[in-house]
Image (cartoon, helix red, strand yellow):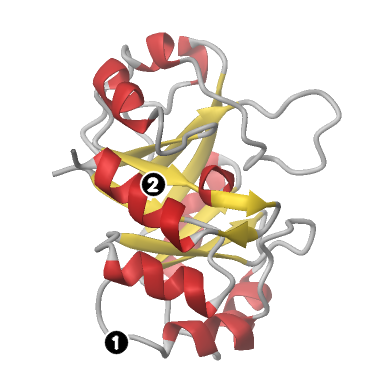
Amino acid sequence: MKLVKICGVNSPEAFDAAVEAHADLVGFVFFPASPRYVTPVEAATLSARHAGFPLRVGLFVNPGFDEIDAILQEISLDILQVYAPAAAIAALRDRFGRPVWRQVGVASEADFPGAGEVADGFVVEAKPPPGATRPGGNAVKADWKLLSKFHSAKPWLLAGGLNPGNVAEALAQTGAPGVDVSSGVEIAPGKKSPELIRAFVRAARG
């Protein structure tokens, strides 16, 4: 069964829908420039609505130890998902004792994560477009044909430009073991639709 992550969860309705649809992971964005940003307290309040599954993922952009420390004092996270250089991953994992997944933007095979990378998993998307204010999460569809050539012994999620209408095709073309969606289940930037969340999970596993 394909892994499904609903990222940028920032409302009770979205969190409940992800739980009810049996998503594997929910993501909280701790990057203020994102329209999906939540404070640590807001994320903890949402997380407390349901115990156990799905796994809680915190998304960070070039985080320092103090930033992650402060957030972990408010909410327990199962996975740290980071926009950071590959060389920074080992220190984060050693410091916090949690799996660390690296966000990777790809435009060619040269951008694929190397076999020797220490990250525990990857979220793979297109490189940000010129002028983008965020390193990812820009709703840009990745090159599915290119990513059909990406094979990793570690888990990875396909991200970027996915929605309930195209996720099945994306999985078929890329062979990805899972998918990560944010804007593709929204009715406005940062506003998740419970109906689209449920439809996305169904389509990804159909």
Question: Residue furthest toward the right?
Answer: 131
Above or below, 160 against 192 in this view is above
Query: What type is the residue that disc 1 sits on?
Result: Ala
Left or right of 122, for residue 22: left
Q: Residues within 10 Å of mark 1 (few under 14, many from 20)?
A: few
Q: x, y percentage for residue 43?
A: 55, 80
Residue at horizontal 35 percent and vertical 24 percent from the top: 170
Residue 71 found in image quarter: bottom right
Query: What type is the residue that disc 2 sits on?
Result: Ala
Residue at horizontal 60 percent and vertical 47 percent from the top: 83
Residue at horizontal 40 percent and vertical 38 percent from the top: 164
Q: x, y percentage for residue 77?
A: 42, 75
Image quarter (top left, top right, bottom left or bottom right) of the N terminus: top left
Whole-number angstrom distance, CA of label 2 to CA of label 1:
27 Å
Instruction: Using the image, tell me which numbered label, if any, was put on residue 51.
Output: 1
Secondary structure category for the residue under label 1: loop
Left or right of 39, for residue 89: left
Q: x, y percentage for residue 75?
A: 49, 85
Can residue 38 be seen in the rendering of this structure?
yes
